[in-house]
Every structure is written in structure tokens, then in C-alpha cells.
Image (spheres, rainbow, N blue to C red):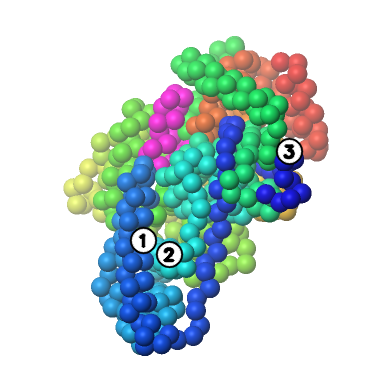
Amino acid sequence: MSEQTLNNEVLISGAPACPGIVIGKTSLYERERPAVSDENISSDEVQKHLDKFRDALEIAEEELKALQSCADVEEPATLIQMQIAILHDPDLRERIEQKITAQVPVDLAVERTFQNYLEVIEENHQKNAFQNKTVDISDIRDRLLQILHNKRDDIQEETILVARELSPREIISFSGRNIKGIITDRGGATSHAAIIARSMNIPTVVGTKEATEMIDSHDEVILDGRNGEIILNPNEGTRERYQRLMDQQSEREADFKVLCEKENKTTDGQCFTLQANIEFAEELTIAQKYCAEGVGLLRTESIYLGRESFQDIDQQVSFYRSILNATGSHPITIRLFDVGGDKFFEDDKPEQNPFLGWRGIRMLLEEQQILKNQLRAIYIASADFHGRIRILVPMVSTMGEVRQLYQIIDEIKQELTTDVIEIDENIPIGLMVEVPAVALKADCFAREADFLSIGTNDLTQYVLAVDRGNERISNLYDQRHPAIWELINLTAQAAKDYDIPVSVCGELASDPISACCLMGLGIDTLSMNSVVLPTVKQMLLSHSIADMQKLGQEVLRAGTLDDVDKIFSNWDTRN
């Protein structure tokens, strides 16, 4: 803690990314790699550096095994096993030891050998497989360098993690240490990393800009994930006040159980469906606890983690079956592999505007083997679950993409049928409405789709021209903007005209009053992060569909975001 803040209570503000209040000590995380040596060692020092290298290998393996034993998510555990396998690679070891014997210092030997290793892989693998391997190899290289320089992260069990930024992979990795909360300088509430944190129900505040400059390791903070506030060095009165809020939070949890078991009906009898957005099978525990009626958005990008490539159909089938088996008779909407932007994948050809670039269906139609393998896996998994799977297509912007996809789906179904493999031939194909062009011409897309699902996170980003991960302009990103409601209404009307289902699977559905407004516009199926299901349900149960329809019409007449805020505020007060 700086002298300026020592013993003084300091408020730091950011964006709320996962609700919940926690009080605890902090661990500061720095991602930087140590600088390697640039001068050769003497012949007398060779054995010492060989010993350091072998010790580092042992320490790295012990750490990875310890992490593996506490990882409760299949994909990270598999990733860790792959990293252990890299440590055992005899060729890699021999090359590093040869360099040390030639009087190259151990850290430089590790750096150069891994660099050569990455270049060889790049020359001999397709870019997707290369990307996946480079992430794993780079991770293990950095771990070895940190051990050699004795520069390890100081993340303690059950602390609140403070970092400039975190990748989804890092959040998954640190979750094994029972992290109580997360604070980051960078990132928006709808970034993929924030979504991962929410899916793990870790109270999180992002986009603080300066938390790492104001907070040191072992400081005490209160993290309020409801409003994005962090209180550094809280005084006794503040600590007691937040402790009471935490007690109330625990009591509310108990009430949620009764609430969630109630029938999903408005006060005047209109039924609605609340589903969960998930990425890992482990997230189903919270979804089931809060009585989610199926999975409205199953993200499949995590399959890419820990896999040598996206080629293993059996592993995909196993994953889909695990979700289907765990969700009873409820429907599951599987989104096709959606990479690009902030979602794990980095092409070896960097793009200036990745969110507007090679992602979603655009990538899948070029990398057709990935697409075909995923479709094949989904249809094979469907054999024992007829009528429960839906396929959702991400980042659609033209009908040409949709028709090309349909052609590939027909080919896959024909191949499987010829091989006498049982499948559900009638899996509905839906389109994700997240590009403004699709919303504006929703009638054309609705005519050729089995269902529509509105992704309000990206739709907002594209309509408002605001990068949702950029904290400098995060004040401009608001999913309740009147233009968004206009496009949602167009989509809902198109779905109604062509008598196909429409749902919302973006963060807008997580806001209780917005959920009422969506219902008022005719969208009665909402999918969201499981942790907010009770609060949204409580709001929907407390109002009539007639009131919600009035709310929807008022919002459609709004001209500015301020107008929408006033309407929502007044509606909340009078209801």
C-alpha cells in the first residue's frame, strides 16, 4: 500500500462483473516474464546451471501436479497433464542441456530452445493446432523461467486476486487456489474473462484502471461485486457494515431456494422460461440449484482448451453427452465454435479489428474440418437425446453464410446415415442475432431459420461502435440504449411473423427490469448466467405481462439512454 493510502480508507471504483461481497487480504499478480541473461557462463559454471535446470523441471512438475489435484474442471486438468508431458519431452531436455554444456546460461538456453521448438511446430502444423500448442508451450516456458529467477506469483489461498488484466485461462488456473474475488485494472463487464469469472461465481470488479497501483499484496479490501466498488483499508465501521450485508446475502441465498421452485408465471398467468448460459459441465451445479430450464447457450470454445487440436470427435461427443445427461429432459442449445475477438483464439495473422474480423461462422466456413468435426460430434451425441439439442450459429451476417452452412450440415447427416450411425435428423438450426444487419433484416433470416437467439453483448458493441472490452470507453457501452431495443423489437416481430421461437442469451437478460421489458416485447425465453436467475425470476414473478407490455412500448418510444433510464427508474418505483 502506498504511504498516501496507508491507514486511510480508500474507495476504488470499477465495473461490476460478478455480484457478491467478500472481505479479505489481497494477492497481487504480475504476468511479466523475467529478462533472460545475455552473457555466456564459464566452463566451471556449467554443472551448476545443469543442476538448476533439472531442479526447475522437478519443481514445475510438482506444482502442476498439485494444481491438477485441486482442479475441479475437466478442461484445465487436461491442459495441465499436457504441460507435464512437455516437461518430460526427452528431445526438449536434451536440446536445453546441450546449450548449457556449450556455456549458454540456463535461462537463455530455455528461452532459445522453446523458441526453436515453437518455430518447428509452426512449420509443421496447421495454424489452429499451432495456436493451441503455442499457448501450452509458452505457459510452461514462462513457468520454468519464473522458477529459475525465483520470481513466482504470490497468490495465496483464499485471497482476493488483483491484476492489471487476466485471461480466461488464468482465471481457470487460479480458481484452483480458492480465490475469493477478482479485481482487474482492465477489461469490461462483458469481456470473456469476466463471463468466465461469473460462471465460477467469483465476485469480480473489472476496469478499475489503477487498482494495481493502489493495492499491494496482503492489503485488506472489501470487494462489492454488486456495484463495482472496492474499499481499501476499511475502517472498523465499514467492515461491520459490509459484514452485515454479507450476512443478509447468506439469508437471501436461503430464500432463493423457495423462490426458484415456484412455477414460472407472471401475476396474470403468462408463462416464461429461464435458462442458463454455461461453458463447463461444472457450472450446471449452480444452474440446477436455481432451477434453470435447460441451457440456452452452451459455449463450446472451452473444448479448444487442453486439446491438441479440435479434431477429437470422441472427446466432443463425450462433452455434449455429459451436459445432456446432467440436464434431465430440458433442451440444450449448442453454439458452434465461436472464436475471435477476446475468445481464446489468436490467428497467426493479427487483425487490426479482431471483433470485426475472422471469427464465428466466418472462420468455420474457411476451417471446414473444424466445423464438420463439431457437427459430426453433435449429431452423434444426438442419437440418445432426440428433440433436446438445438444448434446456434454465431456471427452470421449474410444469408450466403447460412446457406453454405446448411449444405455442409446436409453432407454430414448424409455421411452419418450412410455409415448407419443413428442421429436426430431434425435438430433445429438457429441464428444468433448479434450483427445489426441481421436484426434489421430479421424477416429474411427468420424465414430460413428454425429459431433466433439475440446476443445482446455483441449486438450492443456493433450498434454503438464500442469495444466492450475497452474500459476507456466503457461508459458508452450500455445494452439499454434505445437503438438496441428497436432492433430487439424488429427481431421479435420477425420471429412472430414466421412463427419461430426467439430468445435472448446476452447480458441484457440478466438485468431484472430489462428482463421484464424483453417479456413485454414478446420474448418469453431468457438465458443468462446462473447466478442471477433468482433475482430475474423474482422480478418476473412480481409483475403482470400487461405491465411489462406497457414498459416495452414506453421504451420503444424513448429517444435517448437517459429516457430509458427514467422509464426504468419510474417503472421500478411504481411497481
Give the magenta-colored segment's residue range.
Answer: 277-299
24 versus 251 height, above or below = below
Asked if the residue under mark 2 is in contact with the one under mark 1, i.e. CB atoms within 8 Å, the reply is yes
**Residue 66: x %, y % from top left:** 34, 50
Mark linked to residue 147: 2
Q: Amino acid at mark 1?
A: Ala
Is label 2 in a helix, a strand or a loop?
helix
Q: Amino acid at mark 2?
A: Ile
Q: Residues within 10 Å of mark 3 (few under 14, many from 20)?
A: some
Q: Amino acid at mark 3?
A: Glu
Front-most of 373 and 21? 21
Front-most of 303 and 494? 303
Identity of the residue drawn at 35% across and 33% down? 388
Is label 1 in a helix, a strand or a loop?
helix
Asked if the residue under mark 3 is in contact with the one under mark 2, i.e. CB atoms within 8 Å, the reply is no
In the rendered image, residue 286 lying in the magenta stretch gets the answer: yes
Mark linked to residue 9: 3
**Which residue corresponds to mark 1?**
60
